[in-house]
Image (cartoon, grey):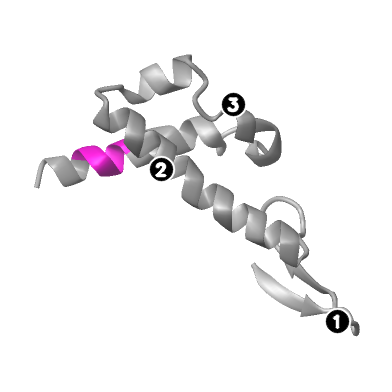
Amino acid sequence: MKPVSTGSTQKSFVSGHGRDLNAAGLKKYRNDMAEMPGMVKKEYAAGRTAEDMIRVDLLKAYKSEYSHLDWLGPDSWIRTVVRGLQSADSK
């Protein structure tokens, strides 16, 4: 994502995937990207598997916003975060 000057004080952030964002949209995106792994970590610590989290639709609130690509969305993020946590556990 890189900022683009529009000749005004308003900035647009052009994403390689998804829609372009203004400053408020970028802040929301950053906050969401921090919240989602936190939710997964909490459920993982409580003994839930990635499939458990997907089955209960843990990240349902984020799906409409972040499911731009069939293969990349909140459910795939759950699996990725859990794999990282499992890897850290095995060290």
Determine contact: label 1, label 3, CB under 8 Å.
no
User: Earlier along the polypeptide chain: callout 3 or callout 2?
Assistant: 2
Q: Which mark is residue 64?
A: none
Percent of width and height locating residue 5: 81, 81
Residue at 76 percent across and 53 percent down: it is: 19
Left or right: where 49 falls relative to 68: left
In the image, what residue type sits under mark 1? Thr
Magenta: predominant secondary structure element? helix
Q: Which residue is mark 2?
A: 38
Q: Which mark is residue 9?
A: 1
Q: Which residue is mark 3?
A: 60
In the image, what residue type sits under mark 3? Lys
Q: CA distance from mark 1 to mark 3?
A: 35 Å
Q: CA distance from mark 3 to mark 2?
A: 15 Å
Percent of width and height locating residue 52: 38, 17
Percent of width and height locating residue 39: 43, 36
* Secondary structure of residue under mark 3: helix
In the displayed orientation, state which residue is furthest to the bottom.
Answer: 7
